[in-house]
Amino acid sequence: MSPHIRPLSPQFSSGPTKKFSGWTPAHVEDAAIGRSHRAKEPKAKILSAIDRMSVLLGLPDDYRLGIVPASDTGAVEMAMWSVLGACGTDILAWESFGKTWVADATEQLKLEDCRIFEADWGDLPDLAEVDFSRDVLFTFNGTTSGVRLPDTNWIPNDREGLTIADATSACFAMQMDWAKLDITTFSWQKSLGGEAGHGVIILSPRAVARLESYSPPWPVPKIFQLTKGGKVVEGIFRGDTINTPSLLCVEDLHAALDWAEAQGGLSGLISRSEANLSVVQDFVAGSDWCGFLCSDVANLSSTSICLKLVHPDVVALSADEQAALAKQMVAMLANEGVAYDIGAYRTAPAGFRLWGGPTVDAEDMAALMPWLDWAFEHAHK
């Protein structure tokens, strides 16, 4: 027998993520489509989105937030191409995207003084080994491993280098201590459930000082250029985007921000995400076949919740057999229309990845849990 209750929404994809409940195409009817993004009214919408995100995130007044091309990937690489190389660099990598930044630093930029701190799936590197006289690049929340930083207490206030945080699945779902973060990047397709393709970069005054005092030795593509004539291009942070943004996506962002504000702002969004994690924690605590990929409960991500198969019969299988079993379960749940796109990331260990960001309702997460048992019971025979 299958469970009696189904999630009202089966959308648990980790990106693009679920839109807020009640979203319809009517939310973008006022989009300034067919207009130049440089025109007065469309530019005002872009600037308003910048200002509203800054307020919702609680940014200090002297921090700058700008919309940039190519989603979070473009924002991270914009930061790397613009500031790295001024001193040594430490990079932390414990999941797929962190390893991408390692490849960028070592194979593309070919940094001469670059130290890599890696950890296996489910773990964090030793944060005590990081040297803050150097620039430090890290993923705030491991979207593909379900492992997040427990806090930023390991980052000193009197650091010499810059901290660069890829926070695409952390912003709007986790508390950010801005005093510890010099360059932060994200895309609103994650925690806000917006449309993909646009990145956001946040600069501290220390980051601005680096940009205006350092010229990297490599060519910087136009879509990465944050300075002109030795000065930060302020227009980027006041609605003059480097390339043409989608005004349909900007309108959709405003709808998401309306919803976020109605949830009680940042604290409400964080509470919604933590509620989703709590549901899964209760399920895992009572399960004999399912566990968290993350090895330390203090580091559990509330947005990218990654699960693995731990039943003794399954652990005894080969890696290919475990992957086949997980894939079968994912397909069963999709065919039932109760959960879409919850397979583990393609390079991660076999298992499942549930998006638990603020736009997912905890009631839907709770309704899904019995279906996971159902799928395992039927696939594991």
Image (tube, rainbow, N blue to C red):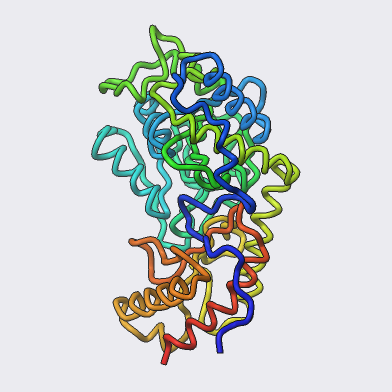
Name the residue: 44% across, 19% down.
36
Horizontally, residue 324 falls left or right of residue 1, namely left
Horizontally, residue 275 falls left or right of residue 321, namely right
In this view, the residue farthest toward the bottom is 381
Vertically, is 42 above or below 18? Answer: above
Name the residue: 64% across, 38% down.
257
Q: Nearer the viewer, residue 228 or 250?
A: 250
How far across and how far down the image is residue 293, in percent? Answer: 48, 67
In this view, the residue farthest toward the top is 229
- Asked whether residue 171 is in view, the answer is yes
- Asked whether residue 204 is in view, the answer is no
How far across and how far down the image is residue 337, in percent? Answer: 49, 71
Q: Nearer the viewer, residue 233 or 197?
A: 197
For the C terminus, the image quarter is bottom left
How many dots with numbers? 0
Vertically, is 232 above or below 262? Answer: above
Name the residue: 37% across, 74% down.
327
How far across and how far down the image is residue 275, in percent? Answer: 68, 60
Name the residue: 38% across, 63% down.
348
Specify the quadrant of the image occupied by residue 5: bottom right
Vertically, is 378 above or below 25? Answer: below
For the N terminus, the image quarter is bottom right
How far across and how far down the image is residue 129, in percent? Answer: 47, 46
Q: Nearer the viewer, residue 283 or 9?
A: 9
